[in-house]
Image (tube, helix red, strand yellow):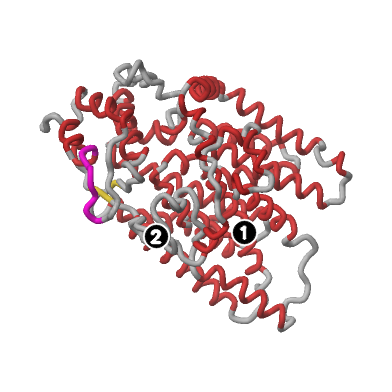
Amino acid sequence: MLTKLRPFIFLFFINVIFFLPLFYPNLKIIITPEYGGGDELLFHYPIKFAYQQTLHQNKFLFWLKNTGAGYPIFAIQEINFFDPINILTLKFLPFVYAINTQLFVYFLILLLSSYFLARTYNLNKILSCLFSISLTYSFFVTSNIIHLSHISSMVYVPLILALSIRALKISSTKYWLLFLSSVFLQFISGHIQYFIYGFIIVLLVQTINLFLKRNKLRDIFDKSILNILLIYIVALLISGFQLLPSIEFYLDSMRSNTVVGYQQKSDLKLLLTIFFPFIFYNQNLVSSTKYNLSSFIPPWDSNFFYGFFPLFGYVLFIFYRIKKKIIDIPKNYFRPLLICLLFLLILYLGKNSPINFIYNIPPFSILRANERITYLILLILILINFKVFALFQKVRNIKLLVVVVLITTFTTNYFSFYNFHAFNNTSVYHLFNTNKEKNIGRIMSLFDYHQIIWKYLLKNGLDKSQNNIYQELIEL
């Protein structure tokens, strides 16, 4: 029993090491700004703080009456209103502990679900741990902490993909129920964009697998695909308490009119970030002369770095292939993943894509920042990377190389994370009174629609020992 649990225990302690500086020796909270402050710091943190106050009174804050003509906070999924992890941590923990604990739990879920996916693709336990660490702590994922609702949704994608594969392969009621539960949890827990991405990757992988089985074209959408569609329909029906308000919110708000402007012309040159995350800008997002702030896509929308040494797997593959030490590669060993990767790269191009018309069709038409499909590209790319490593299992000294890859992958991603993000102390007043972070070059400023949030928090006593928090904010 203990032997089976070793990978999970190992991943748990890896996650403890990664996030320990947020709790010890001093409690910190991430306040990394975007341009103009950022959704999490200026919008989601204050709403979550107000939400927490009502949870302490055993109530749900469905509506902010002081925001404009009223703001339905349960209708927009970006604040994790119905997410069980969000509710439990805000209910029972102080605010900063709650946010940091959410991070720890989300990343632990991603570690374990990624491990489960790798095992589903027949990687051994060591390589599955490596895949899990590489994806979970990749720079794209860790920089998205400033969009916590993205994280809370994307952590379910590897699990949903793995469960769909197992459900169709084994046809077990257990896997179908787990698949349905995971889809439901993903939808109510976070950003709808990554829910759609989860649906896309499941449908894409299964369609490619069916196609490569030499099925006739008319047989591709057989009962397997219909079963997947049925699972998603049932999950959405169950989550109607979140779905219906969200639909009304998107249709009747200005948000639905801003989608087209966010469908950018992604550039494949961003693939160069696989070698180093800060090629086009430094850790403060201060770009080179050639690339000004408006000419590049920020790392939380697209960055492909997941460590230095994993890429050596491809170099070793070429080397051993030339030396003929790897002779037999199973049929369709790489082909399904390579086809999937190619299709995702085409989607990644956005308006530059030869199939850009797809962004006028639901559900693609409601997506902003199409380059966020980077997450799916990373998942497939890293999976291919470690399937390459799996071919070396009988090569001499390969275990030593795997250990080196493990250590370097974790440490490079660890230091990339802590060099990039900005932190603050535990004072709630200082948390919501931050306009500049001295350690970084990005300056935060208020968005117009955030002003009422600050007034609400001030009115309800964010920190009664301080006066006129909002006035101090707008004077800077």
Q: Which residues are magenta?
A: 432-439
Type of secondary structure dominating the magenta stretch: loop
Percent of width and height locating residue 91 = 34, 30
Q: Residue 44 or 117: which is nearer the viewer?
A: 44
Asked whether 137 falls inside the magenta stretch, the response is: no
**Residue corresponding to mark 2:** 281
Q: Quadrant of the C terminus?
A: top left
Residue, x 39% and y 42% (percent of image)?
Answer: 102
Give the residue displayed 35% in from the left and 41% down from the top: 38
Q: Quadrant of residue 325?
A: bottom right
Which quadrant would the N terminus be assigned to in this image?
A: bottom right
Q: Is residue 172 left or right of residue 63?
A: right
- Identify which amino acid the numbered label 2 is placed on: Tyr
| Image location of residue 198, percent across then percent down | 60, 41
Q: Which residue is mark 1?
A: 383
Vertical comparison of 212 with 164: above or below? below
Question: In this rendering, is residue 83 above or below 348?
Answer: above
> In front of the other: label 1 or label 2?
2
- Farthest residue in the bottom direction? 323
Q: Magenta span has 436?
A: yes
The front one of 445 and 153 is: 445
Q: Residue at point 29% right, 21% down?
A: 57
Residue placed furthest toward the front: 290
- Residue drawn at 74 percent across, 42 percent down: 168
Which SS class for mark 1? helix
Q: Mark 2: few, some, or many residues within 10 Å (few <14, many ≥20)?
A: some
Q: Earlier in the sequence, mark 1 or mark 2?
A: 2
Report how far apart the C-alphas of labels 1 and 2 lie in the structure. 27 Å
Label 2: which secondary element: loop
Amino acid type assigned to the residue bearing label 1 in the image: Leu
